[in-house]
Each structure stands twice: as structure tokens, then as C-alpha cells.
Amino acid sequence: MNKLWVALTLVLVFAVALTIALTLTFVYKGRKKEEKEDKEEKVKKVVWKFKVEELDSGLKPSENVLEFDLNGNSDQTLGKYKLTLKPVSHTFDKTELSGRAFTSEPEMRLKGFSGDGSEVSFDKVVLCSGFTTFLKDDKVDFVSLWHTGDFHHYSTKGELLSKGPFPFAAGDPSKSPDKLDLPKGKDLEPTKPPVIPPPKEPEPTTPKEPVPTTPKEPEPTVPKKEEEKEKAEKKTYEKFIPLEEILPGEAVIDLSLYTFAIQEKPYEYEVNKVTVKISLANKVGQFKSFVYERKDGKIFKPVLSFDGTYVKLPDSSVKQLRSFLNERGEPLVVTYLDSARNRKSWAHKGKNEWELRSETLTEGLLEHFAAFLDRSTILDVSVKSGSYDGGLYTVQVSETTHVERKYQDFRSFTHKFYDVSGTGTNVKSKVYKYKHRSTELVGLPPKPEVSHVVVYFSRFDEELVKPLMITIFVELAELNYLYSLNNTYSLETNNEKILPKLELFASRFNPVASIDPTKRETYSPSVSEPSTLLYGKVVVECQNYNPTKQFVKCVHTLEFEGDRDPFNVSSIRHFSVSVPDIKVKNVETFHLRNEKPGLLLRFISSSERVTYLLKDGQYERSDFEDKELVEMLRFASYTEANYISVDLYNYSSYYYNGTFQEPKLHPEKTVVVKSENHKPFPHVLKVEHTLEKKSGVKALFKVFETNGFLSHLPDEKFKSLEAYFSFRVADHALMVVFHSQTSQFIYTWTGVRYVHEKNLGYYNLATRLKTLLYKVFEVLYLDLTPTKQFNITHVNADNKTEEVRVDVKEQGDVAQVLGDSSSVKKNHYTLPKCTEIRLIDGSLYSLKSPPGSHFTSALVFHWNKSDVKKPVFLIFISSDDSIVNLRLTKPRKWEKFNVLDYSKFVPDAIEAASS
């Protein structure tokens, strides 16, 4: 019994161990499966759909889309195309690039592709040998695909990242796919479209029919496939049969008798015992239509009668036939339902020739038939690339690559006509109508022999929805039709008005402005717009610019449709400036006083500032720090308007900023200074300042500032400036004279400030200097030859004379020197109050009174001989009773001496006076 229990126990232990082992195995496998699923979940499919043109595959259009997983890491097969994977890796500087190149066999004819929500269509079909996916963290980062002449790099969503160099290259051409062996392609010319096959239309009913749908934009046509041609040839009509061959059951549809049918009463006629009834049907747009049917209601086989001939259509179970007419009453198309209830439409090619068409009948298609019958072409100016059917001809559209510079802010597209026969030759055509999508453009004439048409849009019209000008080329003429209002255009024969009008309408439909740097008040965003309130305005707000009030800062902001949002700058008026291609919040202009235009332009966007400095009459881009702004403005003031800062106390040449310190932008010293003694008053120094930008050539200048001494100068152009200094008082110019081309501006120092003496005559300048010296500094210019009372003439600020009297009293002979013919006589001068005396005798002798005193009188000893009277001894007496004795030692030379030795020096003094 014990052995049995032991055996049972062992079996139980084994069973438990087995259960645990199996459980652990399943748990481990489950976790591995989850890890695998998690890993697979991390790399999700990223599908691109490639649009492939299959010229001979017989696929339906929906089957021309091939789906490809960008994250695929092995060879793939898409339909008949095998994509072979080849790893790619390269290192640019420190950037490691790795990816997968997929090469297609055979090459695909790509028309475009779509990613996650984005669709890209190529201008031309690309014969593509493959593409490359580049990885980041084992996932596709971007895709490189060759088309339109270069490599294009797209995100996985189909967004264009860059063209040419890789997205991370920041435009560096050395980091481009050309360095790697990647699949490329070749751009093919678009397939030449033949004549568009015709319309399908719902079964017409009488008297009321549904109005045809709004036409879709014409699409480029493709050549018919061989099997389609063979099928069409089997169902052709019988041409030009004689009337007698018309069989029973066939009805003659006379397309010329529609005029007899009116709304109130259908028209009936009989041919070969078959009565046909014509009823007026609904118009489609501008096109009239009529319904033909047998009066007895039976089915029939249509025999079309027009232009004197008969043609028999192949279908024999027609219940009703509807015809559409152009404005001349010519049939455009006939349509009916066949026995299988399929819509059949036959387009009239002229002279009772017909062509079976398969498109749904719309007003737009009827227009194309009408254009073809009219031997003309419809131009759709909304098309920007590729080709479209225009009726008689195919129209090829391409963007103009070289537009005249005067239209540099406008994009243009050229529409040319090509024969649908496929000859590839540009032809001339009559234009049936001009339209923008489904909207007809008014005012554009249907000119014959048009060679091509160029359509202009503003480059700021991001969607290119508003054609501003349409230029029609007829023979040697170039006819410019400009937009006016409500899709209406008018001919402009004055070429000078074209650009202003283009800018006008560009500003009406887009937030764009032409900035005028001369304006300090609100103005129109367009040059030619007379009103600033009609469509928008540029608001200008100005204020003095600190730290100096010499400059004014103005901010130009566009107010468009009531808002002040960021806007584009189309041009700078009066200047040829390549403006930055950014949207700006505003444009700043900095002006000097009343000068126009602004010395500096600054374009302010949300992320950057672009600055232009005025130099030699044009704005040049310039980069500098904000702390250098005032220096830049000063430099521009000098280069553009010859503004200089004058330092009255510089006695040698200096720089335009009034200093000897070399400025940053202009190293030449151009303010030339010349100093000389003033001839009438040698004790006065005359300092002349002139501007010479070229050595020896004086230029007119304006004064920016004069170190603060003269703050209210006239805004005039000056030839020169003269500053007069007294030798006694050199800390202020006694007088400053600005010489303009026609007058003088004289400023004098009053001892406190400078005063503009508006009434002073320039001819009294010397006298006024003498007056200022006397009144301000108590300097008296004294002539000591008179022996009787005399007056010293002065001039006041109003140019009026004032007299200062000097009394002279004779005090008798002092000595009889040489008999009766010569003697020395003493005269007493009573002097006006003065602290300095300057002798007017050519001696340049100047005498100052002791501090705190002034001169009161003088004794003058004159040597008399015949009519000659010359002073030989002088005695000056001051208010403090101090005395100064002078004797003449040589002609025009005085020396102090001791008066006690007077008799000793008499002979020498008389000799000096007589020599």
C-alpha cells in the first residue's frame, strides 16, 4: 500500500512539473509574439500612389494608379513593373545619409503621385527609372524623385522640401544627389491631343428637358487607341447618298427647316411619305436646340440633310433626334439614343461632314464645337501649364521665362496654337472667345490671325486667379488689354500707363503696396490710384527720432480691406530697388529735417529686418548694428545732401562730422579751413570753412550742426562760412557769416548768445565788427591824428549808424624844434569808456587798461610841420589814475618810456615821424 502511495505521489509531482513547464513555454511564446507585433506596429505602411500613363495597356483610367509602401525594405512588384532595392549610403561633412534606391524595370511613365492628403502633378510625363527613400531611425524621412529637369525631395506626405540639394543642405550645391548614383528620369513632351471625341447627353424629352450641367474645364486629349479607331470606323455613316436611295423606315432630318418651328406650334414636313415634326427645345446657354421625330411616333433611321447633301447615320431605331445650332443657325451636333439606350452624338465638321463623339454634352463642349465650325479657337486664360483643346486648335501653355524688366513684379503665361494633326507647328488662329474657367471675359475682340497670347498675373496673387492684363499678338501689333471691372478689359495704347495700372489692380486684389520713401503722410498703395480710401491706403506715422531731433522716423503700414495685416512690397517708388521677398509688418523710413526721400529704409517682418541705405542716389542693402544707426544716417546726410557739421574752432581741415577723428565710412577730410588776419582790423582773425569733396573743387553744402552754438540755422545751401575772432576773446566767434548763392546770413555774439542780424548790410560788416568789439568787449579802435573834436562811426543790428564822440582840446606848444617850421603841440583827448585801445595807424599796437579800470583820457603830442600832423608821444590815463607813456621809435612802432626823459627822446621821435 505504501508503494502505491509513493507511485501516485511521483505521478502527481511529474504532472505538476509538466504543467508549469508548458505554461512558461506559452507565456514566453506569447511575449515574443507581442514583441514582434509591437515591432511591426512601429513600422507602419506609408503608401504613395503613382499615376502611370499606359499608352498601350488597355487599362481603364482607374487602373493606372500603382500603390507603393515607402517603408518597404525588399524588392516589390507593381503590376508589370519590378522595383529592385539597392542600399544607398553617403556622408556629407558630419551628416550620414542612408536609404534605399528602387530601380524600375521597365521604366514607368509617371504623370504624378499622391501622398497623405497631398497630390503632385508633373508638367510633363516623366520616363522614370526609379526613386530613392532616405531613412531616419529606420523610418522613411524623405523621398528623392527626379522630374522637371532636377531632383525633387518630398516629405512622406508629399510636401516639397527642396529642389536640387538635399533638404538638410540649406542650398549648398555640393550636398546634392548628383554625388550619389540614384535612379533618375527623363522629361517627355506631352502627348499631342487629337480632336476631342463628342458628347453624351441624357435622352431629350419634349417639351421640357433637363438643362445640361455646367461645363468642366477642358482637359488635354490623348490619341485614340487603335482598337477605338477600328471600332469607330465600323460604325461610320453613309456619305452624300442620293435622295432616291432613301429607304422606307428612314426619315430625312432637314437641319435647315428649324426656322419654321416656334414655341406655340411645331413645324411638319414630308419626304418619301414620312412626316417629320420639328419642335423647339430648351436652349443650352446661347445655343438653340430642336427635336426631330416622326409624326406617327415610329422609330426611324436618320438621314441628315444639310448644305444640299444627304448623309445616312448607322442607327435605325431612333425615336427622337435633337440638334444644336450655333448663332448663325448652323448645326453643331445631333444627338439621340440608340436601340440599346446608349447616347450617340455626332459633331458637325462642316459641309455635312460628321464625327461620332463620346463625351457628355455640356455648354462648354458645345462652345468647342462652335469654335471648330467657326474655324476659331477658345482661349482659357486660367490654364497655367500643359495643353488644352481650344476647338479648332490645341493650345499649349508655358510660363514666360523672360518678361520685360518693367513688368518684373508680374508673372506671365504664353498661350500658343498648335494643329491637332500633330505636326507640332505653331499656327495662327482666330479667337472664338476668351474665358477664365467658365467665365467669359468681356472687351477682348475675336481678332483673326492671332499668333499667341500672353496673360499677366501679379506675383503676389498666390492662386493666380485674377489676370490683370492680356496681350494679344496679331501680325506685328502687340495689343495690351488691361483689366478694369467685372471681368471686363479695355485696350491701353499708352505704354507708359501700363505698369501703373498693373500695380493699381495688383493692389486692389492683393495685400501689396508700392512704398513711397518721400511721403510723410498717408497715401495710396498704388502709384496711379487717385483716392487713398477706395481700395486701401498706406498709413504713415512720423515722429522725431531720438537721441537727436535732426532726424524723423516714419512708419508705413498697409491698411487693406480694413485690416493692418502683413503685406508684400511691390516696389520702391522713384527708385530701382530689388525689394526683399518677404511679408512685412511695416516699412520704416528715416528722414533728415525736411529732406526727401528717406535716408534709410528698413523692412520689418515677424522674423527679420532688412535695411537699405541711400548712397549716390540709390538704395543699397546695408547691415549694421542698431548703435551705429545715427552714424549711418549722418553719413547718408553727407553723401546725399552735403550736410556737414561745422566746428567753428577748427583752424585746419577736418571731416564731414566736424571732428579730426576718422569716421567709419568716409576717410577723406573734405571741410577745408583757411585762416587770415582781417585786413581792415588786423587784430581780428578771419577763418573760412568750405566743402571740397574733390580737391580744389568747392561744393555747396548744408549745415547739420555747429557744435551747438548756432541752433537755428536756415535750411540753405552755402558756398562758405566765415568766423571772425578777436585776439583778445577767442572762446567765442565774434561774428559768423554764412554765404549762400544769393545772400548772407550774419550771426553776432552778444556776450550771452548768437543773434541773427537780418537787417545788417554786408557792406557794413567791418564797421559792425568794430561796433561789436566796442559794445561787447569795450575795445576802442582809435585814430590819434585829429587835433579837433571827431566822431567814431558804429553800426547797430538794424544797420543804422551810431556816433561815439571824442573831444579834443589843444594845450599849446611843447617845444620849438626846428625854428618856426616845426613844432610839437600837446592835445587832450577825452575818451569814451573802454578797456582796450587799438591804434589805427598801421602799428597793430594794442593797450589794455589795468584790471578793474578803464581808460578816461589821453594826451597826444603831435609833431607839426607844414600840413603834416603826426603823434610822436602818447600818454594814456586810466580811471585808477595809472598812466602809460608811449614814444614813437620807428615808423608805426611804439615803446613805453619814462616821461621824465621826454626832452631826451624828442629828436628821435620827430625823426621816426618824418621818415
Image (cartoon, grey):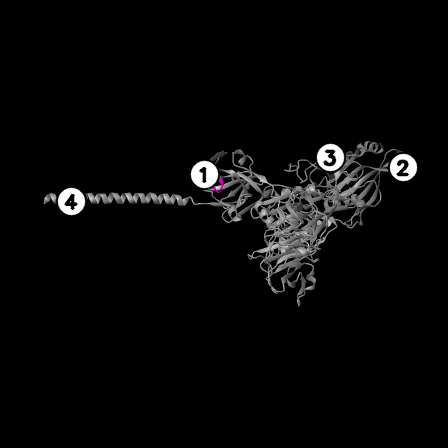
**Residue at 75% across / 38% down in the picture?**
698
Identify the disc placed on residue 866: 2
Badge 1: how crowded within 10 Å, few (<14), some, or many (20+)? few
Q: Earlier in the sequence, mark 2 or mark 3?
A: 3
Select label 3 or label 1 by which is in front: 1
Give the Cα distance between marks 3 and 1.
80 Å
Q: Specify the farthest residue to the bottom.
A: 264
Look at mark 4 in the image and give the residue it sits on.
9
**Residue 695 tag number:** 3
Residue 729, given in percent of the width and then of the height, sits at 70, 41
Disc 2 residue type (three-letter): Ser
Can residue 627 be seen here?
yes
CB contact under 8 Å: marks 3 and 1: no
- Tell me which amino acid carries mark 4: Thr
Determine the secondary structure under disc 3.
loop
Mark 2, residues whose alpha carbon is within 10 Å: few (<14), some, or many (≥20)? few
Is residue 482 magenta-colored? no
Q: Position of residue 401 (x, y in %)?
A: 65, 42
Which class describes the residues within 10 Å of circle 4: few (<14), some (14-19), or many (20+)?
A: few
**Mark closer to the observer (1, 4):** 1
Q: Are marks 4 and 3 in contact (CB under 8 Å)?
A: no
* Image location of residue 349, percent across then percent down: 67, 51
Q: CA distance from mark 4 to mark 3?
A: 124 Å
Q: Amino acid at mark 3?
A: Ser
The kind of residue on which mark 1 rests is Asp
The foreground one among 800 and 571 is: 571
Disc 4 secondary structure class:
helix
- Per the model, the C-alpha gap separating discs 1 and 4 is 59 Å
User: Mark 2 near mark 1, Cβ–Cβ under 8 Å?
Assistant: no
Q: CA distance from mark 2 to mark 1?
A: 135 Å
Main SS of residues in magenta: strand
Please report the bounds of the magenta region as a residue range: 77-81
